Amino acid sequence: MSSSSSFDEKLDRLVRRHAELRDMLAAPNADSAGFAKASKEYSDLSPVVESVDELRRAEAEVESLTELSASADDAAMRELAAEELLELKDRIPKLEYQVKLMLLPKDEADERNAILEVRAGTGGDEAGLFAAELYRMYQRYAALRGWRFEPLDVSESDVGGFKEASAVISGRNVFERLKFESGVHRVQRVPETEASGRIHTSAATVAVLPEAEEVDIKIEDKDLRIDVYRSSGPGGQSVNTTDSAVRITHLPTGLVVCQQDEKSQHKNKAKAMKVLRSRLYDRERQALDDERAASRRDQVGTGDRSERIRTYNFPQGRVTDHRINLTLYKIDKVMNGEALDELIEGLLAEDQAAKLADSE
């Protein structure tokens, strides 16, 4: 049945806690101050307890069928019981696995919105064109999932590519699904300007940061240097005749954020602070992750943004994620966001498997 008595005891504690919370919430004199917290805990535990109940019903049925298959007078009844027993014994490990997945510690950032940053890497103009395509890939993916995609800052190159671009993506569990997109994305194809038909390799870097709130990160005014300047577009073309662009430097860390997308200096400053806050929050998370990763190998990459994570080979029509050795021969569907979920699901499954192995 269950793999260990400690696992059973853990499930017993969860079921008891769920019942306590149910009674607490049903009480006429329930503490209003703690009601919201208890209600959330109860809501979070409910699906787990439902799965535990299903597992325990299956285990009880196994005992009943084992007895029936051994003691029933009717041979046909014994045979039927034995068949059902085999099916249940096959199903129970799957139910256990499902419960264990639900018990894995949650990344508290998973439910957050995300800030997407895409930058052209090595490869000149071709890298900028690829960065723009990646940015649009995530924009289409967000639309397919019903998420809101709000551009923050886009710096275009002279040939229509992006030097760098950022956006806030808002919706349900955005960071959970996009967090493994951080890293170096490599493209192999023949550029339109290549007369000899030679395949070029270039790259773009993607960073996905959980959006931070003011309560997450306290930033002191004395730690900031704020410069304002005139916005400019591709090739130095003037976009604005006032000093509306904002550059914020966080002095303790040296982080610099520039924002010039809005015509209002106030709006640019607010957007820049949003990005800065999220970068600082991400640094804190990375430091904690580094500590945890020191004790175990991370199955889906180190999270290092200099790590090459994926190759997009246009001549062969394939996309390969190097962390999980998954290749899809549907590059067009990946680039329009349709097939991106196949890569994301593979990465999430590998991450869950690594966490399960670490918890045993």
Image: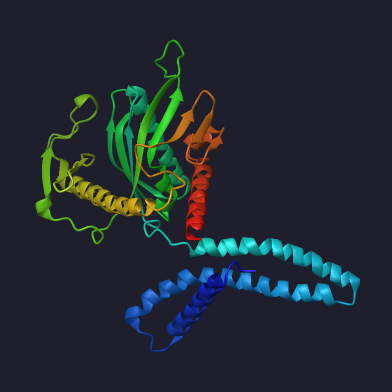
Above or below 60: residue 198: above
The one nearer the camera, 328 or 1, is 1
**With 354 as the anchor, is 34 left or right in this view?**
left
Q: Is residue 33 left or right of residue 27?
A: left
Residue 36 placed where, x, y %? Answer: 37, 75
Vertical relation: 132 (above or below) 353: above
Q: Nearer the viewer, residue 63 or 205?
A: 63
Q: Is residue 139 left or right of residue 219?
A: right
Q: Residue at x 55, y 35 (%)?
A: 328
Residue 342: give x, y in percent of width and height: 53, 43
Q: Quadrant of residue 76?
A: bottom right
Q: How is the image coloured?
A: rainbow
x then y, percent, for residue 74? 90, 75
Q: Residue at x 12, y 40 (%)?
A: 228
Q: Is residue 48 above or below residue 179?
A: below
Quadrant the N terminus occupies: bottom right
- Residue that extends furthest to the left in the rendered view of this protein: 222
Question: Image quadrant of residue 31?
Answer: bottom left
The percent position of residue 320, horizontal first and vertical second, equals 50, 34
Residue that appears at 16% across and 44% down: 248
- Compared with 6, 275 (above or below) is above
Q: From the viewer's perspective, is 353 left or right of 62? A: left
Number of callouts? 0
